[in-house]
Amino acid sequence: MGYKVAVVGATGNVGREMLNILAERQFPVDEIAALASRRSLGTECSFGDQTVKTQDLDTFDFTGWDIALFAIGSGPTKEYAPKAAAAGCVVIDNSSLYRYDPDVPLIVPEVNPGAIHGYAKKNIIANPNCSTAQMVVALKPLHDRATIKRVVVSTYQSVSGSGKDAMDELWLQTKGMYVPGQEVEPSVYPKQIAFNVIPHIDVFLDDGSTKEEWKMVAETKKIIDPKIKLTATCVRVPVFVGHSEAINIEFEDFLDEDEARDILREAPGIMVVDKREDGGYVTPAECVGDFATFISRIRQDSTIDNGLNIWCVSDNLRKGAALNAVQIAELLGREVLKKG
């Protein structure tokens, strides 16, 4: 016997990816519902070899449904997630709404699977921010070995993290560079994104950091260890899909780069591609469609006693969002619901 699963926001980038991954990973689904706003009612979505028509989220009854994967943003989630949870359906939410709620577990299955049992307080589980998700997969096995004191991370985040309109803006601005009269002014972003980088993701906070940077700090502490100090600079780059991160790590204990490489090779969810030669590393273009978080450029930082540098790349629509949500559903099924 399998599960009755609803995908909320099924017509968006992440929602469609959730449907794809549920099918690819052969999640034990007895019945699937693709939910969206009324304006998208009847839109067709693919689920494996099936075509599913979207239903109206506003009138949908979650009673009798096991799991709802939410990909609709904090505003609508605030309205609909409590309704689903109250009906007995476990909500796995991709928005930021519940990530910092002490009564809602924030889960990356390779990192803190034991936290899954905390779902019962509100019948809700939070999915972390895309930039955090791939980073903590890499940090956790190293933290277990040598205890991380401080992390300095610079991100190179693709436009798909801002949604379809952002992807369209990059495409149209790029074309406009070569076709006179077709120039496109910024609308999604505050400045041109084509052939440019923008050191600004989400709103600015009083201390000069952006909310995206704050999220990486708060979520890493909640998922791995509140003692870890972390500072981030988050940058939007003209890449369609795939986030990259340059991560500098300071440990309490010395960790040799060769041992770190071996640890990461054995860690769940990680693929190490680290050759000191032209092309001996992974770029975002190569990670698209893959489940793994790729680690390259592992090397000692000689400026501190116990430091390492690593390069981390992952498909943000997958590990950063849809894949992690499905992995949470798989974990929930194995550890709690036990139907599939």
Image: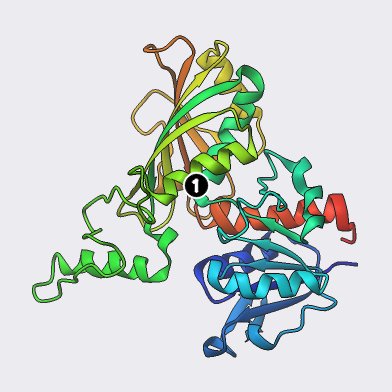
**Observer-nearest of 266 and 87:** 87
Foreground: 231 or 42? 231
Residue labelled with disc 1? 215
Please indicate, yes or no, whether residue 186 appears anywhere in the rendered image.
yes
How far from the left and from the top, in percent, is residue 128? 58, 51
Please give left or right for residue 279 compared with residue 38 in the image: left
Residue positioned 37% across, 71% down in the render: 165
- Three-letter code, disc 1: Lys
Q: In the image as oriented, which residue stretches furthest toward the left?
A: 180
Name the quadrant of the C terminus. Answer: bottom right
Residue for point 54% across, 77% down: 11
- Give the image location of residue 182, x and y in percent: 15, 75
The type of colouring in the image is: rainbow
Residue 48 is at least partly visible in this image: no
Q: Residue 247, image x and y in percent?
A: 44, 31
Mark 1 crowd level (few <14, some 14–19, many ≥20, 10 Å Cα): many
Tally of numbered tags = 1
Would residue 257 appear left or right of 156 to someone viewing this image? right
* Residue closest to the eye, 200 or 111: 200
For residue 16, what is the image quadrant? bottom right
Classify 337 as above or below 260.
Answer: below
Q: Which of 148 and 174 is in front in this view?
A: 148
Work out whether 86 lies above or below 115: below
User: Percent from the top left, x then y, of residue 234?
Assistant: 37, 45
Q: For the residue labelled by badge 1, is the local secondary structure a helix, a strand or a loop?
A: helix
The quadrant of the rendering that contains the N terminus is: bottom right
* Residue 222 against residue 24 in the figure, above or below: above
Residue visible at 81% across and 49% down? 117
Give the residue drawn at x 65%, y 19%: 145
